[in-house]
Image (cartoon, grey):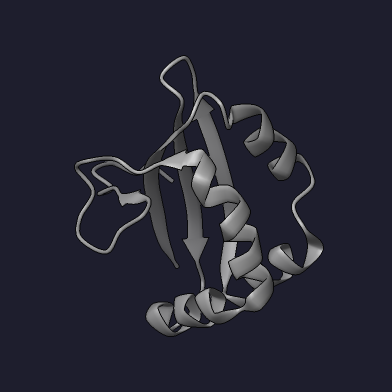
Amino acid sequence: MKRYAALIGLSEDGKADYRKLHAAVWPAVLAQISASNIRNYSIFLKEPENLLFSYFEYHGSDYAGDMAKMAADPTTQDWWALNMPLQRPLDTRSDGEWWADMTEIFHHA
């Protein structure tokens, strides 16, 4: 199992829509997340800065392959098309990132 965390901004104008979407995530999107070996997935909102922090645990053996399958899923693509315009990627993210990956520097189990 590997833990992943990422950060992105959320537009003030899109905050209500983002909350509404995530209060009733489509069942097919949730199924795809599970099929991609993702567990304990959470998204937190920090206000008033409007920063989204995501955390999940990956329980598979081919992270790149599972993420590629998720990205190719038509329902997931539709879900992302609704959510991405509401998000504000950080200027400091790495090339190819939408959500900026974070490095774990401490963990206590």
Image label count: 0
* Residue 103 sits above or below residue 57 on the image: above
The residue shown at (61%, 78%) is: 73
The residue shown at (19%, 42%) is: 92
Q: Position of residue 10 (x, y in %)?
A: 47, 33
The residue shown at (48%, 45%) is: 54
* Residue 33 sits above or below residue 81 on the image: below
Tell whether 63 sits left or right of 16. Answer: left
Question: Can residue 56 be seen here?
Answer: yes
Tell whether 42 sits left or right of 26. Answer: left
* Residue 89 sits above or below residue 63 on the image: above
The residue shown at (51%, 50%) is: 84
The quadrant the N terminus occupies is: bottom left
Tell whether 71 sits left or right of 17. Answer: left
Q: Position of residue 80 (x, y in %)?
A: 57, 59
Tell whether 87 sits left or right of 91. Answer: right
Q: Position of residue 2 (x, y in %)?
A: 40, 64
The residue nearer to you, when weighing 10 against 40, is 10
The residue nearer to you, when weighing 103 against 92, is 92
Question: Can residue 60 be seen here?
Answer: no
On the image, which quarter does residue 31 sit in?
bottom right
* Residue 74 sits above or below residue 1 on the image: below
The residue nearer to you, when weighing 30 against 4, is 30
Q: Position of residue 16 (x, y in %)?
A: 66, 28
On the image, which quarter does residue 106 sit in?
top left
